[in-house]
Image (cartoon, rainbow, N blue to C red):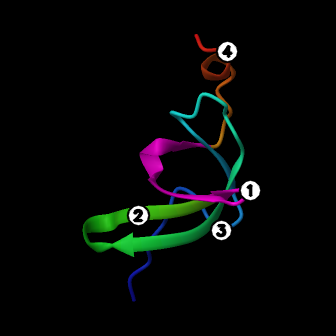
Amino acid sequence: MHTHFTEYTFGDIVFLRTDVNQEQWIVTDIFLHPNNVCVYTIACGSSKHDAYDFELSKDKNDIKKLGL
């Protein structure tokens, strides 16, 4: 049996690294693709977005929010 470990799991609160507003997103779906590629579906209010793990962070980037 193959076990795959992901950076994030269902219900985790994450932030998009490129989001200047640093909104809180929640992980709602995880898609595992060949070659250990993982794509997360995240939701914020009524918005949904698909993102790779390198696009996400568990920590809010306050400097990004200040526009610096």
State which quarter of the image contains the C terminus.
Answer: top right
Q: Do labels 1 and 4 touch, CB within 8 Å?
A: no
The disc label shown at residue 45, or none: 1
Q: Is residue 7 left or right of residue 10?
A: left
Residue at 54% x, 64% y is: 41
Q: Do labels 2 and 1 touch, CB within 8 Å?
A: no
Rendered view: 68 above or below 29: above
Badge 1 amino acid? Gly
Q: Which residues are magenta?
A: 43-57
Q: Is residue 55 magenta?
A: yes
Residue at 41% x, 64% y is: 38
Nearer the observer: mark 2 or 4; the answer is: 4
Badge 3 amino acid? Phe
What residue does disc 3 label?
10
Task: Choose the circle earlier in sequence order: 2 or 1.
Answer: 2
Please state which of residues 46 and 60 is positioned toward the viewer in this rendering. Answer: 46
Task: Choose the circle earlier in sequence order: 1 or 4.
Answer: 1
Task: Choose the circle earlier in sequence order: 2 or 4.
Answer: 2
Q: Is residue 27 left or right of residue 6?
A: right
Rendered view: 64 above or below 53: above
What residue does disc 4 label?
66
**SS for dot 4:** loop
Badge 2 amino acid? Cys
Q: Do labels 1 and 3 touch, CB within 8 Å?
A: no
Task: Choose the circle earlier in sequence order: 1 or 3.
Answer: 3
Q: Residues within 10 Å of mark 1 (few under 14, many from 20)?
A: few
The disc label shown at residue 38, or none: 2
Residue 64, given in percent of the width and then of the height, sits at: 60, 21
Q: Is residue 68 left or right of residue 35?
A: right
Badge 4 amino acid? Leu
